[in-house]
Image: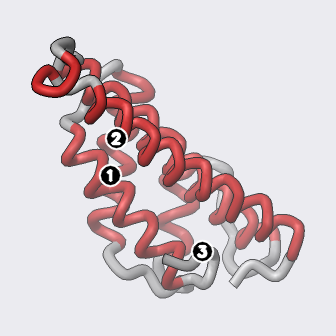
Amino acid sequence: MIRDATALGEVRAEWQYVTGARDLIARNLAAAHPGISGMGQSHEFRNLSYNLCLLFAYSVLERVLRELRDEGIFSSSKELGALMANSKTVLPWQDYSKADEGRERRNDVAHRRHILERADCWKYIDAIEDELVAWGVVAR
């Protein structure tokens, strides 16, 4: 859906970073499991690690929406909430409600210093990936 090949390549690289970071965290947290190494990570640390990936994932979504806006697919201000709302009738959103719920939860992390459970982070990151796949931005 993104026509600018350079921008598309950059966005794909950014998403690859998100998924790579998520996988790296999972591997390292598994290796630090108390049953394996004798030393474990706190529940809070595990959650915080995935919260960082959630922030990265919504940054990629915002970048994609800004690029589509700049290419004239829809018009909007720069704020992520407005970008999402103004693209709702134009883009083939798979589950807009879940992505928007995740945006609100991301705001809790980014602006109100709340830490989400890692399962919630995975749910919202997967929701963003579903959208990016549907829009032809990334492959699964």
Residue appearing at x 53%, y 42% in the figure? 56
Image depth: mark 3 or mark 1 in front = 3
Q: In this view, does 33 lie to the left or right of 130?
A: left
Q: Residue at 30% of width from left, 41% of height from top?
A: 105
Question: Residue at the top extreme?
Answer: 39
Is any part of residue 140 visible from this angle?
A: yes
Query: Number of numbered discs present?
Result: 3
| Rendering coords of residue 30 (x, y %) | 26, 35
Q: What residue type is labelled 3?
A: Val
Local crowd at mark 2 within 10 Å, few (<14), some, or many (≥20)? some
Task: Tell me: 16 left or right of 89.
Answer: right
- Circles 2 and 3: CB atoms closer than 8 Å: no
Real-space CA distance between mark 3 and mark 1, rounded to the nearest whole angstrom: 19 Å
Q: Nearer the viewer, mark 1 or mark 2?
A: 2
| SS of the residue under disc 3 | loop
Sooner in the amino-acid sequence: mark 2 or mark 3: 2
Secondary structure under the numbered disc 2 in the rendered image = helix
Identify which amino acid the numbered label 1 is placed on.
Gly
Mark 3 sits on what residue? 138
Q: Residues within 10 Å of mark 3 (few under 14, many from 20)?
A: some
Where does residue 104 sit, x and y in percent of width and height?
33, 45
Q: Where is residue 70 in the image (x, y as percent from the top left)?
A: 80, 67
Quadrant the N terminus occupies: bottom right
Q: Nearer the viewer, mark 2 or mark 3?
A: 2
Q: Quadrant of residue 61?
A: bottom right
Q: Distance between the residues labelled 1 and 2?
A: 21 Å
Q: Mark 2 points at which residue?
A: 26
- Residue 101 visible in the shown view: no
Q: Mark 1 points at which residue?
A: 102
Residue drawn at x 48%, y 39% is 55
Q: Is residue 137 above or below residue 121?
A: below
Depth order, front residue of 120/32: 32
